[in-house]
Image (spheres, rainbow, N blue to C red):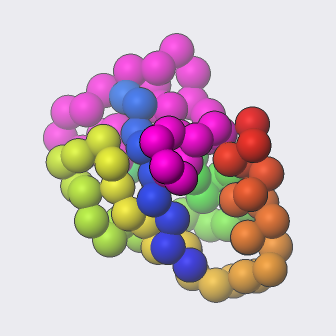
């Protein structure tokens, strides 16, 4: 399953939830956008929010952009879709 996300580096706390633009999930991280730290923190936060291990989440595109495309392995596809939908409603 591919998920479009919008990363907000330098936030006061790390959290995933809400929608940016058309349908991008917002992932706020405390890490700054330096040397990929915010990207890695966003992948960890997304994995935690979806209830999967970090190794099941990989960056497809957008390494240096705030807008990223992430692929989540279909560990439990039905459950993942429900969790993602719930995160976007926050």
- The answer to whether residue 29 is left or right of residue 87 is left
Which residue is nearer to you in this view: 58 or 87? 87
Q: Look at the image and say whether residue 55 sits in the magenta stretch.
A: no
Which residue is rendered at x = 47% and y = 20% of the image? 11
Residue 33 location (% of width, % of height): 25, 32
Q: Can you see residue 39?
A: yes
Q: How many marks?
A: 0
Q: Where, by quadrant of the figure, is residue 61 drawn?
A: bottom left
Residue 87 in the image: above or below residue 79: above
Q: Can you see residue 31?
A: no
Residue 55 location (% of width, % of height): 51, 71
Which residue is rendered at x = 45% and y = 59% of the image? 4
- The answer to whether residue 84 is left or right of residue 79 is left
- The answer to whether residue 19 is left or right of residue 49 is left
Residue 8 location (% of width, % of height): 41, 31
Which residue is rendered at x = 57% and y = 30% of the image? 14
In the rendered structure, which segment of residues is drawn in magenta?
10-39
Image quarter hosting the N terminus: bottom right
Which residue is nearer to you in this view: 24 or 70? 24
Which residue is nearer to you in this view: 40 or 9? 9
Q: Residue furthest top?
A: 12
Which residue is rendered at x = 66% and y = 52% of the image? 48
Q: Where, by quadrant of the figure, is residue 76 drawn?
A: bottom right
Image quarter hosting the C terminus: top right
- The answer to whether residue 60 is left or right of residue 58 is left
Residue 30 in the image: above or below residue 4: above
Residue 55 in the image: above or below residue 33: below
């Amino acid at each position: 399953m591919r998920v479009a996300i919008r990363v907000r580096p330098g936030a006061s706390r790390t959290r995933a939830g809400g929608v940016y633009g058309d349908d991008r999930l917002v992932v706020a991280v405390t890490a700054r956008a330096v040397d990929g730290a915010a990207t890695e923190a966003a992948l960890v936060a997304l994995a935690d929010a979806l209830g999967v291990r970090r190794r099941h989440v990989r960056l497809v595109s957008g390494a240096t952009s705030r807008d990223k495309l992430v692929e989540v392995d279909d560990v439990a596809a039905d459950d993942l879709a429900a969790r993602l939908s719930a995160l976007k409603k926050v």
